[in-house]
Amino acid sequence: MKYYKGGEFPTQPGMYFVYGDGGTGKTSLVKQFRGHKIVFSFDLSANVLIGDKDTDLMVLERSDVPVIQKQVQGMIWRVIDKGDYDVVVLDNVTALQNLALENIDNAAKDNRQNYQKLQLWFRQLSQFLRESGKTVYATAHQIDLGDGHFEADMNQKTFNAFTSMFDLVGRIYLKDGQRMIDLDPESGDHAKNRIDERKLVKADELIPQLHEIKPTETKTKKEA
C-alpha cells in the first residue's frame, strides 16, 4: 500500500461508465474526451468514430474469443505501458462479459464458482485501469426492469465489482429528441457521480471539460 500524508495525494483521472439502449449514442460520447484515445471495440460498432484522428481502434477478432481475458489484459497493459494514450475506452462491456463468461463456463462446471471468477476478473481489470493513471470510459447495454427502472446488462455482482472503481455511472436515454444521462442514485437506476454535483445532464455535456486536462498539457505548465 502507498502512504500519503495529510491528504497530499495525487488527483486521479476520471473513470466513466455509461449504459443504455443501442442507438442512444454511447460510443459517440468518446468524442468528448480530450487527448489521444484507444478504443477496444467488443461489439464491432465503432463506425461513428470514423474520421476521428485522435482515436485509435482495437477491434475484436474471432481468434481472440477463446482467450479473451488474457488478450484483453495483455493489450490494455501494452497500450498503457507504451504511454501514447490519455484515454482508454472499453466498448461494450456487456459483450466482453458474455465472452469471458463463456470461456469460464467451458473451463469449469460449478456455476457459482464461474460467476465468482468472472467477478474477480472484472474487479482486477477495473483496479488495473484505476491504477493506470488514464482517463477511462466504458459502455454497456441496458436491461428493462419494469416500472420505468433500468440497469446495465451485466451480472449484478460483476457490475458492482467492475464499477466500484468508477467515479461516474449513468444511464443514457432519449427524451423529446434530446439525449440525457441520469446520474442520480435515487432515481431507481444504477447511477452515481463522484466528479461533481450533477444528477441529470445532457449527453453532449457529460464531460466537465475544465477537469479534463491532458497529461502533456500539465507537464508543459510545470516545465514553464
Image (cartoon, grey):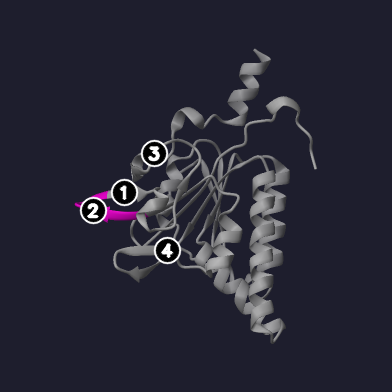
Q: Nearer the viewer, mark 3 or mark 1?
A: 3
Q: Earlier in the sequence, mark 3 or mark 1?
A: 1
Q: Amino acid at mark 2?
A: Lys
Say few, some or many: other residues with alpha carbon within 10 Å of mark 4 (under 14 / 14 to 19 / 20 or more).
many
| Residue positioned 35% across, 54% down in the render | 187
Q: Which residue is mark 1?
A: 180
Q: Which residue is mark 4?
A: 151
Q: Earlier in the sequence, mark 1 or mark 2?
A: 2
Q: Quadrant of residue 83?
A: top right
| Residue positioned 59% across, 69% down in the render | 61
Secondary structure under badge 2? strand
| Residue positioned 65% across, 79% down in the render | 112
Depth check: give the residue in front, 217 or 1.
1
The magenta stretch spans which residues? 172-178
Q: Is residue 188 visible?
A: yes
The percent position of residue 82, horizontal first and vertical second, equals 71, 43
Q: Earlier in the sequence, mark 3 or mark 4?
A: 4
Q: Amino acid at mark 3?
A: Arg
How much space separates mark 2 and mark 3, taking CA atoms? 18 Å
How much space separates mark 3 and mark 4, taking CA atoms? 19 Å
**Callout 3–callout 1 Cβ contact below 8 Å:** no
Q: Earlier in the sequence, mark 2 or mark 4?
A: 4
**Callout 4–callout 1 Cβ contact below 8 Å:** no
How much space separates mark 1 and mark 2, taking CA atoms? 7 Å
Q: Nearer the viewer, mark 2 or mark 4?
A: 4
Q: Which residue is mark 3?
A: 198
Depth check: give the residue in front, 70 or 178.
178
